[in-house]
Image (spheres, helix red, strand yellow):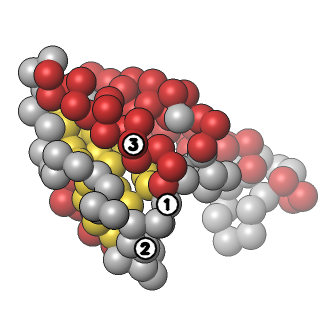
């Protein structure tokens, strides 16, 4: 514990620097765990608010728990568009690929769906077990 009264978070009993160090270390440990799990992590694609709603590309070690958390945090209904074996690295590649259509919140514009369908078709052709509908967009 430090003697810097202006540096304390009210109610936490730790200084800002120590709290930040702890949070950074927790994030590093979580990232390392997901990287180590590799094939046990699942890359998922979720859309919220209907066919014109934003799209989220993420990963989770426990997909049902992650989807439940997204549903609880979002006032609009969420729909799982697809899931396949993958983790943090694959998520980062997709985020870079679709960066032009990324919203500030980390979600993406629904305009990525046609390109995402092509990417999922290629993943299926390469033998990845992709769960979810073959077409992400509803028929016109």
Q: Nearer the viewer, residue 3 or 128?
A: 128
Disc 2 target residue: 49
Give above or below for 93 relative to 130: above
Give above or below for 67 relative to 61: below
Task: Give the structural element (helix, strand or loop) at label 1.
Answer: loop
Label located before the other in sequence (2 or 3): 2
Q: Is residue 105 left or right of residue 56?
A: right
**Place of residue 32 in the rendered image (x, y in percent of width and height, measured from the top left):** 37, 26
**Place of residue 1 in the rendered image (x, y in percent of width and height, measured from the top left):** 69, 48
Q: Nearer the viewer, residue 138 or 28?
A: 138
Disc 1 target residue: 54
Q: Which mark is residue 114?
A: 3
Q: Which mark is residue 106?
A: none
Give above or below for 94 relative to 68: above
Label located before the other in sequence (2 or 1): 2
Q: Residue at x 78, y 58 (%)?
A: 8
Q: Residue furthest top?
A: 126
Q: Nearer the viewer, mark 2 or mark 3?
A: 3
Q: Is residue 128 left or right of residue 120?
A: left
Q: Are marks 2 and 1 in contact (CB under 8 Å)?
A: yes
Q: Residue at x 43, y 52 (%)?
A: 56
**Place of residue 112 in the rendered image (x, y in percent of width and height, measured from the top left):** 47, 44
């Amino acid at each position: 514990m430090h003697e810097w009264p202006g540096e304390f978070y009210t109610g936490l009993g730790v200084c800002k620097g120590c709290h930040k160090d702890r949070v950074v270390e927790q994030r590093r440990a979580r990232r390392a765990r997901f990287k180590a799990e590799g094939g046990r992590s699942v890359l998922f694609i979720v859309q919220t608010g209907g066919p014109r709603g934003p799209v989220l590309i993420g990963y989770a070690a426990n997909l049902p728990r992650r989807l439940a958390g997204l549903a609880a945090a979002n006032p609009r209904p969420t729909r799982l568009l697809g899931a396949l074996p993958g983790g943090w690295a694959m998520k980062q590649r997709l985020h870079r690929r679709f960066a032009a259509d990324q919203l500030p919140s980390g979600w993406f514009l629904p305009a990525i769906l046609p390109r995402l369908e092509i990417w999922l078709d290629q993943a299926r052709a390469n033998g990845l077990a992709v769960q979810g509908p073959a077409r992400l967009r509803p028929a016109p």
